[in-house]
Amino acid sequence: MKSFFLLLGVSLTFFSVAQNRTITGKIINDANEPLGFAKIAVKSPKGNALSAVDGTFSLVLKDTASANVTISVYGYQPQEMSIGSGPQELTIVMKPTVSEKNEVTVIGYGEAKNKTLTGATSKVDGEDIEKMNMSRMDQALQGQMAGVNISTNSGSPGGSANIRIRGLGTFGDNDPLILVDGIVYDSQGLNALNPSDIKSITVLKDAMAGIYGVRAANGVVLIETKNGAINRKPTIEYNGYFGLQQTSKKLDLLRADEYAVIKNEMFAMGGQAMPFNNVNVGEGTDWQDQVFTRSPVQSHNISLNGGTLATRYSIGLGYFNQDGIVGGAKSHFDRYNARLNFSTDLSDKLKLNSVLLFSSEGRNTLPENGIGSVLYNAINAFPTEPVISPMGNYSYMEEVSDIINPVAQIMNTYNWNKAQKFVGKEEFVFKPLSFLTFTNRFNYNVALVDSKVFSPLVWYGEGKYANTALNAQLESPTVELATGVEIDRGAAVYEERNTYADLSYEGFVNYDQVFAKDHQVKATAGVTIFQREGNSLNGVAYGIPNNDVNYADISANSTQGGFLNNTGSWEFTERLVSAFLRAEYAFKEKYVVSAVVRRDGSSKFGPNSRFGTFPSFSAGWLISEESFFKFKPIDLCKLRVSYGISGNDQIPNFAYRALLNGEGVYVFDDVITQGVAIGRPANPDLKWETTRQLNIGLDLSFWKKLSFSTNYFIKNTYDLLFQPDVSALMGSYGPGGYPPVINAGNVSNKGWEIELGYRSDRTKKFLYEANWNFTAVNNQVTEVPSGVDYLPGAAFSVGGDVATRFQKGYEIGYFFGYQTAGVFQTQDEIDNAQVVQEGAKPGDLIFVDQNGDGVISFTDDSDKTNLGSAIPDFIMGFNVSSSYKGFDLSANFFASIGNEIIRNYERQQPYANQLSYTIDRWVGPGSSFDVPRQTTEPTRNNVFSSFYVEDGSFLRLRNLQLGYSFSKDWLRKIKMEQLRVYLAANNLFTLTKYMGYDPDLGSSSALSAGVDYGMYPQAKTLMVGLQFKF
Amino acid sequence: MKKHLLIIGALVIGLFSCKKFLTVDPPYTQDAENYFKTPEDYERALVGAYDLLQTSFMSLWIGEIASDNAIAGGESANDSQGLHQIDAMTHGGINNDLRSVFRWNYVGISRANYILENKDNIDFPEKAHILAEAKFLRAYYYFELVKFFGDVPLVIDKRLGIEEVRTIDRSPKAEVYAQIEKDLKEAYPVLNAVAVQKGRATRGAALALLGKAYVYQNKWSEAAQTFDEVINSGSYSLHPSYAELFDVAHENNAETVFDIQYTGLEGGSYGCLVCLEGNAAPGFQGIRQYNGPVYGDGNSYNLPTQDLYDFFPAGDPRRGVTILDIEAFIAAQPNPGAITYAIGAGGHTGYYNNKYIKRQGEIGLPDNDLTSPVNYRVIRYADVLLMAAEANYHLGNTAIAQTYVNQIRSRVSIPGASVNSLDKIYNERRFELSGEGHRFFDLVRTGKAALEIPGFIPGKHEVFPIPQVEIDLAGGRWPQNPGY
């Protein structure tokens, strides 16, 4: 390999013929190490040379006059020197660059100097992401940035998280626009992205995102992948870890004997026979121990980075493999990544940037986060039942039809999900003049997503909803094809292939020129064309032979004639065409103004609203540059303001079109005649959701060490999609008709963000760095259309009331139910109460009479009230790292304060197991003032009330890492640049009062956030890691 | 560099003319925007436009209940508040039943408009007839609206967007009638004289409806001419037996000019009255908790008044066909003691609408209160004759009027009456057409409503109020009808 690069270096050396003289030399660093791949550039006469791996170079110059040369090499300060006449033998010593954080921020179709940046952005370096040792970039982002809230949908391997920038703007799609090297990357597909491939993540939070117009309302996440550098020797890096995971929490459930006592009491109080004659049944089965397991996780990444005179490259290979803490290999994720970033100068003025990201991932999942999930079953399964009954079958627990044996459930769950993804671009950058750059790029993002589900014939016990067999002998249900023709249904397999392909072209020109020293003018203008196609083909086949997973393929089906087999498909196309313009002007880097306008046309919108224009404006004032500003400790003081309009185009495809799903039936000749009618009328005016955002920010820097940045924002989203009552003239109230989708309804988010960072002096031995961020967002629904009181969200319990709502004056998805005020102690108390609560008995929950009419109404909503929401009052991140000599220690904390969670994993059935708080139940006057009596008789204690709402605030140590790097002197001997070993832990501890598994409980739907069905918790992981570089 | 500028320049220009690129049809999906590609598409959309005719049971009820012919009845005054308010002439802008009339007829209009909007997509021989039927239907629905509400927004040949809805004003009654006339005049020459299928709009139906529209505008000579065409066509005659007229068995006879077709073969639910394929009127108008012969049990709505009963001369056989005197009926049965029924708290007169009532042998599938197969006779030849008589009387052709009235009377074997006043014709209309939903509108157009209907305020109650919510949903720009 090395000789290859040597050859490459030599061949690229510039040779000339006439009147030559040869200059040779060696380039070394201050430690006397040779530096290869250094560029030796002669201005006049023009000539370049590249040093060989041993640092030597040879440069042939045309004439003998003295020459000015510039020597540059990656990682060192460029050096200029003059070479005298005549042949020379030189030794050049390079000084390393003082490592500084990147001073430039990407802002979409260009970049801006941090100093003159006028928008609200946050940035994280790739190493801070990689260090978290998490499988997904979004998980690693939690607590890293102000204004960016990450919530976890599931802790299962490959489980997703939600990125929410500055609150929830809609009950629809709140995902930000994610761009990887400028390529649109679906947030649902983030599993494919290897966090180790990331160089930096920049989040555009305010009107700055306006350059992305109709897709910018939820914020924009710009991800850059690692690239090489010119004049850099090839460097191979390895980073890997192996870890063991276990659940971060087990619920405190009743033991068998506690369970027996309480169930006896429940049945007795309900006037029924007590189920347990003997309550001395010991501990019984701990179902959580049966489903939780310790499981491994490992990650290996290897990369090759380097560059020559005209070419830069970075190549990465990655492997990740994780088994779940529930069900082990049945809950699994693995991923292979390959990455190529390649740039080359095709000529002096034309450069090619090429990126190719390939990933292949596999995932197996168990039913989770819902009624019927493995954990839901484990929580509610009877501790008095063994896993396997004396009869040899998995115990049935037949008393509750919708709780099945979770161990059997894991055994019988078979699914395979695979995704292959190719993402990349070919980008041509043409720079004819120093102030003018043309960029043309062609992006692609292709994903093949396959899934297969095998549903064997299973029997969980009499009457269980999940049974697919007729009985314990696993006899198959039959299907009647025609009178008298019956065939067995058998085991089934479902297969699906979805293909998505994005193709886009972007062309833009950047202009950047300084006039009369003080006037900097920058401009960007461009166009983009984007097309996404998706299609799916799926099929289901029955009669899989022998009920055996080894035949789980459609091809193996054995139903007669394939009569039961079925297929389906869908297809869509969406297109977006845009033009944008950005102009910036800076005077003496003191006053900066910037204006953006983008025009978007999208196939998603109705013909009357197909095009939208999105302007935004921002300005900055660097007060510290003013001559009157003489306060020395502050080296930067900048005031920023921005205002802009952006859109959210993540609305359903074709929602503007009328559908022929109405009912048009009439009777001709006494025969019912089927016709056709419009069901949902068209809304040719349908358009994007619009967000208007004002941001005021202040950046301060003290002694170049302590940085402080704060933002206040008001973000109002308008024109949310609704189907409210519409005028009769629309014709939507016929048979099978329903109203069109229209734009109405507003949401407001107002908030504060603070980012505080400190970095110790880089030259000291003891280095430390700390940053803290804080975000408080006040979310409120400010308008719902007339004819709509609220939008219903998630239901409580099985078939219970709607517990969350989207309603004017409240937070999105706030909890709506009865407020409790303790427990009735005596009949006297009930009889003498000011408020009549029908059916109440001593030991029942006391509800608060919200409307003051003296009666608790259970037939309408008049006594229900706001019981909180999943939206935190504020979130905080605290990240600290330090190093001393070879040791380094870092910790990342995240806190979410003031969010509530609905405890919705308790099956309200007499036999279902319960949390141990029921031990402190009411059993007689004075015995309990908060936990109601336990009884099988009907009570109102299980309607949705504040009894089921818990404080979900938490503080979590997300990552703790202790590393040791071997000394460079020693490494040099074995030709290594870096060698580091480390111990790390994820989710080592969580401080919370929440009783459930994991208070970091997200949902992709804004209306069901904070409803806990027994969430798959995030694992606590202990890891050992190794990093080396040579 | 120039090349680049050119490319980008071209793209920028191209961008603002790229509507075509952005017009994406959902692949392999037939939805409303890419429909009307085959003759069958037109035919099926037409069926959808016919569907709303079946909601006319509400017009029938209100036409009777609002008049002196009937009371609302039912389980209680709260059960169908809207109808009770109309009965008492206390109705206002908030009335679910009036809102249903408003909504349903606009559904019919929008479905007819949907066809006419796409009339030029393809050509095929049957298209002219389909378009003519669509025009007939649109005229029918607009006639219902103008009858109920007076000035109504006129939407023609297009579907409205949500924004557009807020820009449309109520069109003066005259303009609505002009559109009705236009549609019918365009339709009737094309329509078949004899329906290919029972239930299809015919030339006679279009002409009769046109004549009726003229009558409602007091355009007597146009009305007389139009009815002449119907009468002279020879297609129609009075059915010999008045008693059989409202049987399922004798439906679509020579007297049928236009019937709305119903079937009992599809169930239904109270949750979606607009979805019914059966006639809701007979069940609703049936005898409450009735247990006995001949009839089925119903909901005791739309009960004829004593006033109507007494209006008939004792010898007019049409009284018994029009009104069921329940006690008299029971008393005449072999075992009267075994027959039971209940009186609804919504009102009781002792009489039931005997033309549209649930009868054994005419009971549809569950829920059979809603699924009667009995057609609604919208325009009978008898009605045509009486309207023709009225028009001719206005024109001074009393002899012709006399002939027509006598035809009506001789069919039920009662002596001819001397038609020496309009009232004679009006009375004959009440004898002949009571219980069929015409009475209130006849009283209004003849200026008799204030005399006959207690609580009727002239200048106000001639039209019903526009549902307030519809005014609001249309942007609040429509004035409410006077007095409401």
Image: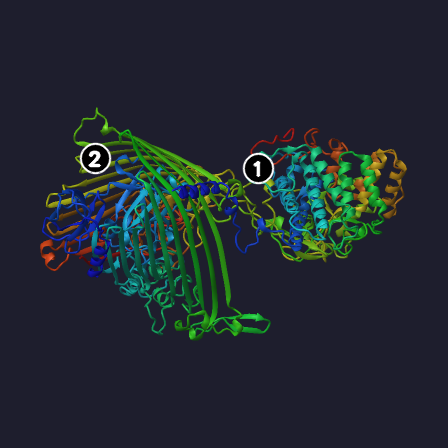
Q: Viewed as shown, does residue A207 lie left or right of B327?
A: left
Residues A241 and A35: in front is A35
Q: What residue sits right under mark 2 in the picture? A: A701
The secondary structure type at the circle numbered 1 is helix
Viewer-side residue, B228 vs A194:
A194
**B37 w.r.t. A478: above or below:** above
In the rendered image, is residue A1015 in sight? no
Which of the 4 image quadrants contains residue A315? Answer: bottom left
The kind of residue on which mark 1 rests is: Glu
Q: Which mark is residue B164?
A: 1
Which of the pair B319/A74 is nearer the observer? A74
- How many neighbours does mark 2 have within 10 angstroms: few (below 14), some (14-19), or many (20 or more)? many
Q: What is the x, y in percent for residue B279? A: 68, 51
**Quadrant assignment, res B164:** top right
Q: In the image, B299: left or right of A548? A: right
Chain letter behind tag 2 = A
Q: Nearer the viewer, residue B29 or B122?
A: B122
Q: Residue at x 12, y 57 (%)?
A: A971
